[in-house]
Image: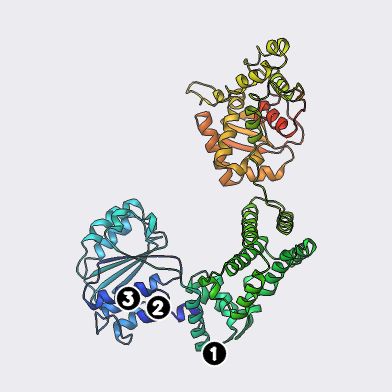
Amino acid sequence: MAHVCLFRQYRPQRFDEVHGQDHVTRTLQNAIRIGRCGQAYLFTGPRGVGKTTVARILAKALNCVNGPTPTPCGECDSCRRITAGSSLSVIEIDAASNRKIEDIRSLREDVQFAPTDGRSKVYILDEVHQITKEGFEAFLKTLEEPPAHAVFVLATTEAHKIPATILSRCQRLDFRRVGIEDIVKRLKEVVAEESFDAEQAALYAIARAADGSLRDALSLLDQIVAYAGESITAAHVETVLGTLDADTRFALGEVLAARDAGGALAWLNTLLDAGRDPRLIVDEAQAHFRLLLLARLGCSPESLSALPADVRTRLERQANAYDPPRLMAIVEGFAAADKALRWHGQPRILLEVTLLELVLGITPQAPVPVAEPARSAESAPPPRPAAPRHEPRPEPERAAAPPPRPRPEPAPEPEPVDDRDEPEPPGEPEEDVQPAPRPAQPLGASDELDYDAVAERFPRFMERVRDRFTPLVAHLVRATLERVEHGTVVLGFGGWEQSLAVCTMDGNKKRIEEVLGEVLGREVLFRGELNSSPPQPPRGGERRTVDSLDHAARVALGVFPGARVEP
């Protein structure tokens, strides 16, 4: 006989066998008992918590030979057919593949026929949120006034995607994540039934990895049994799941408590050299220090009280080596590293720096956006006129930089620079910088999309990218505007292959094209390329950078005060 996976083999067949959903099963049992069963239910909640299972039990309760009854017998022909999935009175529909208006019309026609082997016809629509708008509209009348023999159960993990007109016609029952203790209890029942030998620590590790899904927990148990056989230890679970064992997690806590930089780097390198995933290392470390923080504060949520007694004792002992503010800083540091790993090309270096910051007590500073130096340079001139000449010197240089550009505004600037030493130059840059938003005017219908038109609007483009997609700025500032051809804006990334790869990813490419379209006033395409040698200057012997010379000068002056900017 073919093997049946554990989560199907041990699927609950009665309301009292459902774990962690007492508020749902009690509501349905009482409704059946007093004859107030609804015509349409919406079961919503995370994956693997029993939505479809409870819907089948409801169908049994309504069609049992002794029913309607809150305790179906499971022995009559109707109950057996429903258990085997062969009952004509229970129609399970995958709404993900039957989502169009034609499918709903077929359902409306079918619902008019009375059941052939039961009392009620139960329609279970799984992933119902994927039905189209037109399909939902065609379903409204049938859902509101179904035949007396029909009961609808709509199951979904994303109830917010369902129209309000559908929600108002259903009784909504929210399924919750199954608690760790409930999952462990169920795993113990399955292990005993299957005659497996499993350590309690192994069962707790499986329950934590399942993240509230009982189906996931049974699937993991099935996978671990295939690896370890019928004798399961915590080490087997950690090997299959790739998680860190308790000793490894506590070793990290010890080196950070002792502020041992060498020990922290050795701990990290051992894991990375063994092939552990950097993201998993960060997740496990963050979870460990969260538990230390809860233990240090004396909190006892389910995640702490559900731990084995020996692990909980070690946590409480190690937590005393830290004060709460440092534990919070460590948790935040690992959270920042987890976020940065999505964009960082050298995870080992990032994790090493993170650990050293946590060991030395250095608070990681948030990266400064590219445009920040420009803002500080723009805001600096007003208080500086009375300062010595060497302090505001960058400002005249910055004002003198634009004249070689073909823009008309810088033309009058040489007069104030020559006639006045101090007061005028600080004021002039304001006049030069203030018109910056002007190039952001979208192109008119008759305007030509050429190199100059795009170059003039790139500063505004960079501002919008910075405001909406900040991580992309660090890569776009390395690019140069190469050419505009047939509605396509071509940027050259020099030898920056990683920046080119990031900017040309499907999602990022669409974001860049979206912002370009807003700034230019028409749909354009974006293409990036590597250009090892500088391209020919497009106009007037000048090569324009993506963020414009003005912006680059302001960034340089913000980083190196007193520097001279040469055109």
* Mark seen at residue 195: 1
Q: What residue is shown with label 3? A: 26
- Using the image as rendered, state which of residue 415 and residue 38 is in the foreground: 415
Task: Locate residue 356: give its quadrant.
Answer: bottom right
Q: Quick check: 397 left or right of 213?
A: right
Foreground mark, 3 or 1, reads 3
Label 1 element class: loop
Amino acid at pointer 2: Val
In percent of the image, x 68 and y 12: which residue is there? 416
Foreground mark, 2 or 3, reads 3
In percent of the image, x 65 and y 64: which residue is there? 285
* Mark found first going from the N terminus, 2 or 3: 2
Q: What whole-number distance in Å separates the C-alpha atoms at marks 2 and 3? A: 11 Å
Residue 4 in view here: no
Residue 554 image offset from top left, x and y in percent: 68, 29
The reply to whether callout 2 and callout 1 are in contact (CB within 8 Å) is: no
Residue 358 image offset from top left, x and y in percent: 70, 58
Residue 23 image offset from top left, x and y in percent: 35, 72
Q: What whole-number distance in Å separates the C-alpha atoms at marks 3 and 1? A: 32 Å
Label 2 element class: loop
* Mark seen at residue 18: 2
Q: Residues within 10 Å of mark 3 (few under 14, many from 20)?
A: some
In percent of the image, x 65 and y 16: which residue is there? 410
The reply to whether callout 2 and callout 3 are in contact (CB within 8 Å) is: no
